[in-house]
Image (cartoon, rainbow, N blue to C red):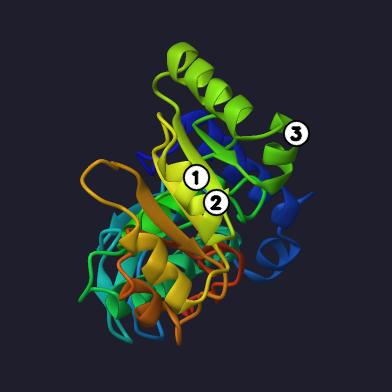
Amino acid sequence: MTGFINGDMSRELIRMALEEDIGAGDVTSLYFVPENRKARAFVTVRKEGVISGMGLAEAVFLEVDPTLDVQVLVEDGSKVAPGAMLMKVEGKARSILTAERTALNFLQRLSGVATLTSRYVSLVKHTNAKILDTRKTTPGYRALEKKAVLDGGGVNHRMGLYDRAMVKDNHLVAEGGIAALQEAIRKLNEEKPQVEVELEADRLEQVKAFLELEGVDYILLDNMDLTELREAVAMRDERHRVRFEASGGVNLETVADIAETGVDFISVGALTHSAPALDIGLDFVVLG
């Protein structure tokens, strides 16, 4: 499968996707394609991009018909040119046609995420900044889309609410001030040392205060302009192991300038909530 998510989870997602597409049966193939017709098909990319989701696409074809001969020709993370053949499938024509759309849906969506991530990564490669994803993912697809971000050269942020504490303005109000915040961090560090702590700051005064706290791993610089980002980074010295993440106002036009301020990470929600699907199709040849 993908090697990134639980096998049972990916199989269930594939079954759900096939069920919503096939329902009571693929009437077009059943009535218009002879039962014994054999075919060969090539999954082919139409536009330049970065590929992700090959394991899922292969699994879709085999879920529909385990007798199909499926050959994966390109690995996830590969940069491909228009016309590149990604996969060869041979066997019953009905089976190939029934599986086609679901397999392509996974492949197009995940390759779209990987391709957009790659574009962002290429724009900051002259700096030390890393491109992060967010939790703004398609429900049920989070592990798949975060795997696609990795395939595009990006870095995963937290997977969910359980593996990193992200303390935002509303949490700070609830905590009741810096002293209570420090105590909460201390308690979390003691009870769950594997969980990292990130604090959100939208003002430089907050950054200064947060740098003096113990047990903080990251400070999120929220919607700060370039001057503020540079000033925040300048506050850090050899005493501080904290890393800075910039968020807000990030797009393909602004990301390079943000990276050049010296921040360690730049989070981009668009990687998963706005990535256009990569144009991938299936070329079909009847064998007899």
**Disc 2 to disc 1, C-alpha distance:** 5 Å
Q: Which residue is drawn at 57% across and 60% down?
A: 203
- State the residue in front, 26 or 119: 119
User: How would you rate the neighbour count of disc 1 (Cα within 10 Å): few for under 14, some for 14-19, many for 20 or more?
Assistant: few
Q: Residue at x 57, y 23 (%)?
A: 184
Q: Can residue 116 be seen in this view?
A: yes
For marks 3 and 1, give the one nearer the viewer: 1
- State the residue in front, 156 or 103: 156
Q: Label 1 sits on what residue type?
A: Ala
> The residue tagged with tag 1: helix, strand or loop?
helix
User: Of callouts 2 and 3, which one flags the residue occurring earlier in the amino acid sequence?
Assistant: 3
Choose top left, top right, bottom left or bottom right for residue 123: bottom left
Q: Which residue is under mark 1?
A: 209
Q: Which residue is under mark 3?
A: 174
- State the residue in front, 110 or 13: 110
> The residue tagged with tag 3: helix, strand or loop?
helix
User: How would you rate the neighbour count of disc 3 (Cα within 10 Å): few for under 14, some for 14-19, many for 20 or more?
Assistant: few
Q: Is residue 137 above or below residue 181?
A: below
Q: Which residue is under mark 2?
A: 206
**Disc 2 to disc 3, C-alpha distance:** 16 Å
Pinpoint residue 158: horizontal percent, then vertical percent.
Answer: 48, 42
Pinpoint residue 91: horizontal percent, then vertical percent.
Answer: 41, 58
Q: Is residue 93 left or right of residue 241?
A: right
Q: In this view, does 98 lie above or below 115?
A: above
- State the residue in front, 59 or 109: 109
The circle drawn on residue 149 is none
Are circles 2 and 1 on residues that touch, CB within 8 Å? Answer: yes
Q: Label 3 sits on what residue type?
A: Ala
Q: Is residue 191 above or below residue 267?
A: above
User: How would you rate the neighbour count of disc 2 (Cα within 10 Å): few for under 14, some for 14-19, many for 20 or more?
Assistant: some
Q: Is residue 173 above or below residue 42?
A: above
